[in-house]
Amino acid sequence: MTSTRERQRAAARARLEREMAERAAKARKRRQTQAIVGAAAVLVLVVAGSVWLATTLGGDDDEQGTTTTAGFSQCVYNEVPADARSKQIKDVGLPTNQQANKGTQTMTIDTNLGPITARLDRSAVPCTAGSFTHLASKGFFDNTKCHRLVTEGIKVLQCGDPSATGKGWRETDGTGGPSYNLAEENLPTDKRPAYPEGVIAMANSGQPGSTGSQFFIVYGDSQLDPNYTVVGTITGGMDLVKQVAAAGDDKAFAQQAGGGHPKKEVVITKLTMSEIQS
């Protein structure tokens, strides 16, 4: 006859077996669920990858303003934060990012001494030419003075500071520009001299991507480091620049960048850019 203790042990074994069976069933169900979730995740990745691939290879029309039309370059004009702008900064907005990279333009610099003209090749400097066109359309350069002349070592006349206006000179002359900067283009790394007589190039702070509005006209071969955008070639008015050079400078920048204010004053009454010619 089975004792009470043995019946209790048998009941306990039965409960343990039921619990183990239930745990095993739950474990199997959990593994099945995980397998289903894992398969679904793989499916999601495959679908997402297919969408990404399709977008990358054939979805250019869906890009938000980053596609570039044939015959145009995508330019970046980096806006200077408002709290970092000096009083010499003149804000006339930003040029459009897409700029034509074909054709030529004529820059006409009307001065108190007469006109100076230059030819710009859009295929070489689409972003810089676009910047000039934008600034000129806003009257950015009008009634500004060419603030720096260098006659020793290099031979350049520098202009394009919107704050260099009025009578006399200021310590801040040469520090002005637009409310944005852009990257350098068309660097003459393979030219000797890098900046021969007759080119017009962009000044910068010496740091990459610091091109603004200031430019310099080279009136004699100058072996500068090739860090400055060659924006075009002078086609008329070089005799006027040489007249200014012959009059000399006041050595105001002799201890810094070199040269000084030209003794023969040059005022840009208006700077214009022609339509693009094919």
Image (cartoon, rainbow, N blue to C red):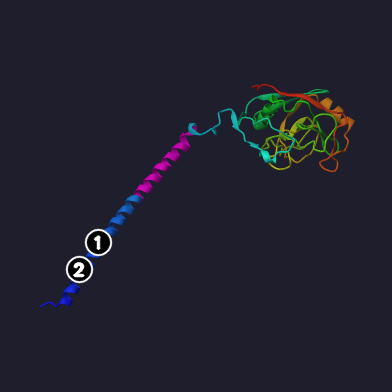
Camera-nearest residue between 65 and 240 = 65
Kindly identify the residue that appears in the image at 66 percent across and 21 percent down. 275
For residue 1, side relative to residue 258 (left or right): left
Is 24 left or right of 146, judged from the image as shown?
Answer: left
Q: In which image quadrant can residue 248 be found? A: top right
Label 2 belongs to which residue?
Answer: 14
- Which residue is identified by label 1? 22
Mark 2: few/some/many CA within 10 Å (<14, 14-19, 20+)? few
Q: Is 103 located above or below residue 45 in the figure? A: above
Residue 232, quarter of picture: top right
Which residues, given as a range, are shown in magenta? 38-60
Q: Residue 32: x and y, percent?
A: 30, 54
Mark sitting earlier along the chain (1/2): 2
What secondary structure is marked by label 2? Answer: helix
Residue type of the residue flagged with mark 1: Glu
Of 90 and 197, the residue lying toward us: 90
Q: Residue furthest front?
A: 4
